[in-house]
Image (cartoon, coloured by chain):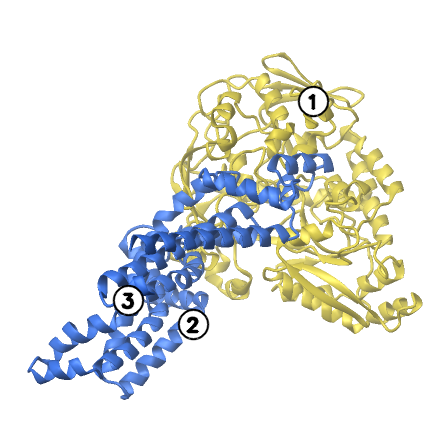
Chain colours: A yellow, B blue
Amino acid sequence: MHKVLKGFALTAMAVAISGAVQAQETPKPGGEVIVTYQNDVATLDPAIGYDWQNWSMIKSLFDGLMDYEPGTTNLVPDLAERYEISDDGMTYTFHLREGVTFHNDREMTAADVKYSLERTINPQTQSPGAGFFSSIVGFDAVSSGDATTLSGVTTPDDYTVEITLSAPDATFLHLMALNFASVVPKEAVEEWGRDFGKHPVGTGAFKLDDWALGQRLTFVKNEDYYRDGIPYIDQIDFEIGQEPNVALLRLQRGEVDIAGDGIPPAQFLQSQQDPEFQKLMVIGDQLHTGYMTLSVTIPPLDNLKVRQAINMAINKERIVRVINGRAAPTNQPLPPAMPGYDSDYEGLSYDVEQARALLEEAGYGDGFETELYVMNTDPQPRIAQAIQQDLSQIGIQAEIKSLAQANVIAAGGEQSQAPMIWSGGMAWIADFPDPSNFWGPILGCEGAVPGGWNWAWYCNEELDARAEEANAMVEPDQREERARIWGEIFTTAMDDAPWVPIFNEKRFTVHSARMGGDDALYVDPVHVPVNYDYIWVK
Amino acid sequence: MAWYIAKRLFYAALILLGVSFITYLLLFLIPADPARQIAGRSATPEVVANIRHQLGLDLPFYEQYLRYLWQLLHGDLGRSYVQRSQVSDLMAARIGPTLQLMAAGIGLELLIGISLGLVAAIKRNSGLDRALMAFSFIGVSSPHFIAAMLALYFFAVKLGWFPLGGYGGIEHLMLPAITLGVLGSGWYSRMVRSSMIEVLHQDFIRTARAKGLTRVRVLLRHVLPNAIIPVIPMIGIDIGIFMSGLVVVESVFGWPGLGQLAWQAIQQVDIPIIVGVTTLSAVAIVLGNLVADLAVLLVDPRIDVKNS
């Protein structure tokens, strides 16, 4: 528990320090900013958008009941002015701000909150986030298409929303801060239908002014935004289709303010050593763990000793060098920035001799042949090769299967297909800063189903039960205890070695010298990648 | 003539049907499940099944394919799995820039190719000839990605002659078009060179020179028009080769065309877009060849389709 407390204290200190830095400079309103990306922006529909490119764009256009303090993982009310939780933890009452208007000038009310949740869950919407809301009463009826209204969401008056859950859920407030719970106006959704994602209307700090398909999106400041003075910037132009290397060159020339895709791996070392460039680069943690799954059902990986041997055979330091130090090695599923991370946990450290001995004990002294699935874009295949070499040290011959992302995901979702998968490029980045988000889908029994994301097919019912208990601890004074239990769940799971946790990726954002605002805004843990609402131009 | 065109159109339709079938089949065989991709990682199996049903992916292959063809005949290319927009809207927004770059690129290919071929043929077997042919050989064998990056680095970054990629006026168009033009010109310069040499050896050229015409006039009035005929069907064939280069060059230069769209779609396994772009490319290639063949008929009255 002390470790956990220490973790909290450190985070708090880091936040305080960064807060102090911010205080030295006063944000200046005005200015236009150019941000570049390589890929098209898929959609700006908050019920559908689910990638690191549109995530914070959507957050800038829309609001939900809850949000986070800029640059941190601290939950704060957003469209809700305040909220109450019933004693049994089953009913949440949100009191909405009055006078908040959508970009179409209509006032946002409780009915919009209810409609937005129902829309996300409705199967016709095909939202990838529908499943998050399964704890709301009436979810199943809407999800199966039998009903279109959620019986668990009621609106006693225009500014009050009551949400009843089928089981206490300590993560529920985080869920209300997800993009999928953003409030949308019914009339605009009905007007545009499935093209709402190209014509978004929200209550957010920016509104979409123009979208030239495949070329440019223009966000302009929402003058009526309910927070006075926010956003600082008058206009953001997102230029699409820019090759990342080219975007960096343009940034160095001052033609671009933020290179959205960051630094391509091949250029990383060079950029990092360039003192001019260092001033423009912001480094941050992210809620990410890169891991290799070891299928607990495919022989010989079904043998615990074999899985432990694989864990000990892999030189994580070297893998981090392969990607030019863009990550820190790790030994457990939870990333350090997540509550519950155990900084004293030793795990299965690198020891080739011990690994060989374990393999011998398991009866595979001569090694065996197996397969390692990996996504086919750089640097993933190079990481897979490093793993392959490490495994060959203890006699395991791993054949690398390098495939497109969707195909690796499909292989992982079939029980007998992939003995080992390197998660790079598909790795779990938390949807919200709570350890439970690292469990259910990727290590819990619920994910160990065909088409699931638990590619190790690890299912420990006892740990699942404890996870459920932890999630029922909704009181604010139970938070530390809850984090401790979660930490234990993950380290206990590692006793069964379903994964080789390899590293926690860091995030790098490059911005032009004229951009102001706390560094934390450029590597915001929730408004990924950049919190556009609070950055400003010097 | 009308009969010839009708016959060619019929074959063209067959080819397109074949292309669409093969593309659709290949993408059907890919073990990626679009329904899961759309449903996201938090989806329950019921949600996935529901989406699969909505997309018609639970139908047998032939039914899916027939459904696709039926929609295609009605101008409906479906919706992108990733962007959820109409594929036709996404392609329509990009077709203009692609046509611009194609016109400029193929124009430059012809200009560079024919000029170099002409010079090489006149100075045949000289050092200049060998240098030009080596240049054309390097051009056609260069990987587009590297060449485009190098061009961007030297001409835009180091020399600052052109903007660093992007879409806009003629200054944005120049560098990608020149890159495509130089890389693709080799096919034409070699072809023009050999057909020039062939024509130069013919009797009527000697006659023309003998009756006192100047060397320049003979070359431009008598040799070139004859030597250029095989270039015309070559343009039709080149459209296909050109498009594969376009995919890469558009991505490097940030040119918002169909190639870039295809590149993204392939990386995201966005099947409706891949099928859409492939179908459109096939139409372009088939039409290009047809037009080139018809153009040859007009240019060269010696070709008789009735006996072919």
Q: Position of residue B97 (x, y in %)?
A: 35, 50
- Secondary structure beneath dot 3 equals helix
The residue to which callout 2 is attached is: B142
Q: Estimate how packed mark 1 is, as few (under 14), some (14 to 19) or many (20 or more) residues with alpha carbons within 10 Å.
A: few
Say whether residue A428 is visible: yes
The residue to which callout 1 is attached is: A146
Disc sitting over residue B110 in the figure = 3
Q: Estimate how packed mark 2 is, as few (under 14), some (14 to 19) or many (20 or more) residues with alpha carbons within 10 Å.
A: some
Type of amino acid under label 3: Leu
Q: Position of residue B179 (x, y in %)?
A: 35, 65
Q: Position of residue B236 (x, y in %)?
A: 35, 61
**Marks 3 & 1 on one chain:** no
Q: Estimate how packed mark 3 is, as few (under 14), some (14 to 19) or many (20 or more) residues with alpha carbons within 10 Å.
A: many
In the image, is A346 to the left or to the right of A406? right
Q: Nearer the viewer, residue A422 or A516?
A: A422
Q: Nearer the viewer, residue A477 or A138?
A: A138
